[in-house]
Amino acid sequence: MPVPLFWHLLCRTYHFVTYIASHALRWRTPVLIKGPGSLSTLPKFLSGANLHRGLLVTDALIMKLGLVNGLISELKKNGAQFTIFQDVLPNPTLLMVEAANDLYKKNKCDYLIAVGGGSVMDCAKLVGVRQARPRTPLRSMRGVMRVLWSVPPIIAVPTTAGSGSECTMAAVVTDLENQDKFPVIDPVLTPHYCVLDPKLTVGLPKFVTATTGMDTLTHAVEAYLNVFHYPHVDRAATHSVELVAKYLLRAYEKGDDMEARENMLQAAYLAGLAFTRAGVGYTHAAAHAVGGLYNVPHGFANAILLPHVLDMYGSAVYTPLAYLADAARLPGASDEEKAKNFILWIRELNVRMQIPATLGANDSRYRIQAKDIPFLVRHALREANPCYPVPVIFGEEEMTELFNCVK
């Protein structure tokens, strides 16, 4: 059953109005500090920023690996006061955010430093939301432009090359009570400072390198395919795809390749810039749905879902995918051939990095149960329609087919 015409027109009207309104928004790009060892320069950089006490948000593994030891030492050396919250887990929950926010308030903090992957940075951003709107529950912040008030300064330090959260206006949180995972999207959530230090990503496990790298690719591809274009978004997305094609397998196969690690951080940053302006698509909506219900790692879900979504878009995306195929240096005599080669390349990347074709192939916990598909469809469509300016609008039939393809 095709998507009803009135719903199709409603979605496209929403997309057009959003596109026009986006030109009036004040978009913030983080102050960028990058290069090997750049994290150690952050305390001196912050010393003149009139910030007094920070909340350092991270996770237990990063603390155990000592990735923040140098930063902590430099902060102390510069007389900075800070408190550490290290209880972030993958797919941060509402309760986790509240615990971090309580610590922020208790210690009278006035800025946030997030050192970690997307979950850590999202948790820090959501603490910022709770500070900006203390009387409004996070569930009410779901969707676009609900925060509005300024958040405390956020310094984002990614330790994976994937989420792009270090430069985006989005944060994602899991609602365990309702088995839901939803985004909070507002320009005020864009971090004020961003540190890209490849030394922090050297030695990441292969699975993390693979899935975060595919997360980067998904961001770039979905941003580029969406219906309203901005020249700087297209440039950022195509450059990100070019870097992924050149460096992801290098980083995966040789974890201490500093050049590959640095360029994958750059690819993730560029993809983040692209999708924070152009949006994402059904790959992300479906990944959030299975992440909320089964706790599937986000990049892992994206890697598996992306080629299926592109197949389902069909001829509507042959031309833009052909441009991305050119960026990835893939062959093809026509747009259709290049587009199909691009989708095949994504599948081949997954195979090379031991990412299976279905969610439950290697872990039964992630296998989609037939009884859950209507729930997943509702949640994915609730997120995507009409919010995401996708090239082809899906309804229940298409989303059901998608979940059946990857279960």
Image: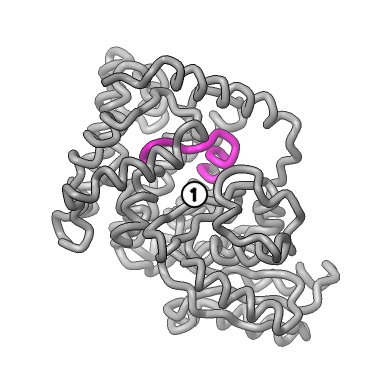
Disc 1 residue type (three-letter): Ala
Question: Which residue lies at the image location 41% right of the left edge and 15% below the top edge?
Answer: 5
> Against 54, is 393 above or below?
above
> Against 372, is 342 above or below?
above
Whole-percent x, y for residue 323 in the image: 42, 23
Colour scheme used in the picture?
one colour
**How busy is the neighbourhood of tag 1: few (under 14 within 10 Å), some, or many (20 plus)?**
many
Whole-percent x, y for residue 305 in the image: 29, 42
Whole-percent x, y for residue 228 in the image: 55, 23
Residue 257 position by quadrant: bottom left
Q: Is residue 337 visible?
A: yes
Question: Which residue lies at the image location 26% right of the left edge and 29% below the top edge?
Answer: 397
Residue 393 position by quadrant: top left
Which of 252/339 is in front? 339
Q: Quick check: 250 left or right of 131? A: left
Question: Pointer 1: what residue?
Answer: 268
Single out the residue that lies furthest toward the top. Answer: 334
Q: Which residues are magenta?
A: 271-283
- Helix, strand or loop at label 1? It is helix
Q: Is residue 242 visible?
A: no
Question: Which residue lies at the image location 54% right of the left edge and 61% below the top edge?
Answer: 122
- Find out whether residue 279 is within the magenta segment: yes
Identify the main secondary structure in magenta. helix
Q: Quick check: 133 left or right of 403? A: right
Which of 287/163 is in front? 287
Question: Which quadrant of the rendered structure holds the N terminus?
Answer: top left
> Against 290, is 110 above or below?
below
Question: Which residue lies at the image location 52% right of the left edge and 37% below the top edge?
Answer: 279
> Against 29, is 178 above or below?
below
Which of 78/320 is in front? 320
Which of 405/164 is in front? 405
Whole-percent x, y for residue 346 in the image: 28, 38
